[in-house]
């Protein structure tokens, strides 16, 4: 199994490649556990998977210039509708060794300004996915 260091990951939100301003990406997915334990379970809990959900978390180096991070994200936040996302471990094309994950996220929060004296101006955000997350190798 090959090991990998994330050096050139890819993140796109609503068709905007934000990789040049992003220094952290985390995509998570989970299913609810539903307890279906009965007396026949002999004292052992039995579970089935319920609804699936996901979350995309990013850390972006803020940029207030025209057509940059804040100018892209603010209208998406105000839009109140899910937007497309795509993430890959590497910026190269999707392949068996570089899968891509796609779906929609709801930009339900945006922190346009955060930090202390001397900090890099960053915007951390996590957004819930809306609908299915797809994994593809092409």
Image (cartoon, grey):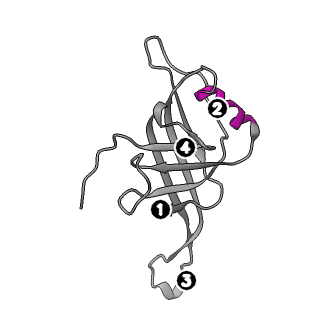
Q: Residue at horizontal 65%, vertical 59%?
A: 131
Residue bearing mark 3: 38
CB-based contact (under 8 Å), mark 3 and mark 1: no
Q: Residue at horizontal 50%, vertical 20%?
A: 121
Q: Is residue 74 above or below residue 45?
A: above
Does the magenta run of residues contain 103? Answer: no
Q: Residue at horizontal 29%, vertical 45%?
A: 5
Task: Report the residue that reaches farthest toward the top.
Answer: 117
Question: In the image, is 108 to the left or to the right of 41?
Answer: right
SS assignment at label 4: strand
SS assignment at label 2: helix
Observer-side mark, 2 or 3, equals: 2
Q: Nearer the N terminus, badge 3 or badge 1?
A: 3
CB-based contact (under 8 Å), mark 2 and mark 3: no
Q: CA distance from mark 2 to mark 3?
A: 51 Å
Q: CA distance from mark 2 to mark 1?
A: 27 Å
Q: CA distance from mark 3 to mark 1?
A: 44 Å
CB-based contact (under 8 Å), mark 2 and mark 1: no
Residue bearing mark 1: 138
Helix, strand or loop for the magenta stretch, by majority: helix
Give the label on residue 12, or none.
4
Observer-side mark, 2 or 1, equals: 1
Q: CA distance from mark 3 to mark 4?
A: 46 Å
Q: Is residue 32 above or below residue 88?
A: below
Q: Nearer the N terminus, badge 3 or badge 4?
A: 4
CB-based contact (under 8 Å), mark 4 and mark 2: no
Give the label on residue 72, or none.
2
Q: Nearer the N terminus, badge 2 or badge 3?
A: 3
Within 10 Å of disc 1 (Cα), the crowding (few <14, some 14-19, many 20+) is few
Q: Nearer the N terminus, badge 4 or badge 2?
A: 4
Q: Nearer the N terminus, badge 4 or badge 1?
A: 4
């Amino acid at each position: 199994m090959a090991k990998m260091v994330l050096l050139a990951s890819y993140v796109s939100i609503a068709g905007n490649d934000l990789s040049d301003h992003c220094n952290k990406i985390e995509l998570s997915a989970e299913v609810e556990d539903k307890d279906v334990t009965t007396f026949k379970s002999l004292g052992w809990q039995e579970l089935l998977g319920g609804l699936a959900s996901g979350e995309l978390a990013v850390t972006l180096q803020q940029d207030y210039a025209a057509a940059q991070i804040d100018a892209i994200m603010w209208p998406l936040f105000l839009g109140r509708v899910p937007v497309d996302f795509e993430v890959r471990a590497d910026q190269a094309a999707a392949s068996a060794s570089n899968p891509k994950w796609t779906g929609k996220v709801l930009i339900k929060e945006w922190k346009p300004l955060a930090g202390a004296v001397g900090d890099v101006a960053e915007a951390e955000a996590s957004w819930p996915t809306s609908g299915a997350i797809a994994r593809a190798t092409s």
